[in-house]
Image (cartoon, helix red, strand yellow):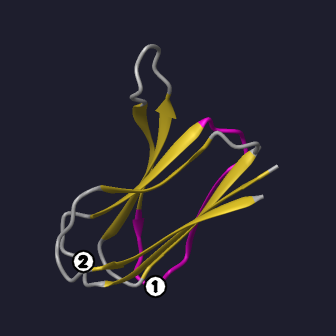
Amino acid sequence: MKTLEYRETLPNDTGSEVTCLEVGNQVHSKISIAMHSASTNTRIKIYYLFAEDNTATDTAKLIQTIDLTQNVLTLWSYDNKLRKVRITRDDTGSAWSGGALHIDATTAK
């Protein structure tokens, strides 16, 4: 089992999409993501990354968009092996109210 952690204090302002974590190339058979935001208007996107031949760039395809509810723990789980997953954060189109953002991504056999 391995857990990757992302911590950030979101400002009282608007933001843009930023990569928080990339999880992949590990020996695992499932992934769980725990997300919590003390701020309003926080959006998390989870992408699957396809490896492309003859290039160092992966092709990202959106798996799910999750709008977090302020001060509510949100869990996302997938019980199959995924080659590589990218987790990003953004605002929902409205400004954040500011506060801590926590994301833990755990892979397990």
Could you say where residue 22 lies in the image, as x and y percent from the top left?
51, 49
In the displayed structure image, the side of residue 63 where residue 2 appears, left or right? right
Q: Can you name the residue that lies furthest to the top here?
A: 54
The mark nearer the N terminus, 1 or 2, is 1
Could you say where residue 26 lies in the image, as x and y percent from the top left?
70, 43
Q: Tell me if residue 60 comes above or below residue 85 in the rendering.
A: above
Query: What span is in magenta?
Result: 67-83
Which is nearer the eye, 10 or 74? Answer: 10
Give the residue displayed 45% in from the left and 20% down from the top: 52
Give the residue displayed 64% in from the left and 39% down from the top: 25
> In which quadrant will I find the N terminus?
bottom right
**Residue under circle 2?**
96
Give the residue displayed 61% in from the left and 35% down from the top: 83
Could you say where residue 21 lies in the image, as x and y percent from the top left?
48, 56
Tag on residue 71? 1
Tell me if mark 2 has few (under 14), some (14-19) or many (20+) residues whose alpha carbon lies within 10 angstroms of its own: many
Q: Tell me if residue 103 comes above or below residue 73 in the rendering.
A: above
Q: Tell me if residue 77 comes above or below residue 26 in the rendering.
A: below
The three-letter code of the residue at mark 2 reads Trp
In the displayed structure image, the side of residue 23 where residue 89 appears, left or right? left
In which quarter of the view is residue 81 placed? top right
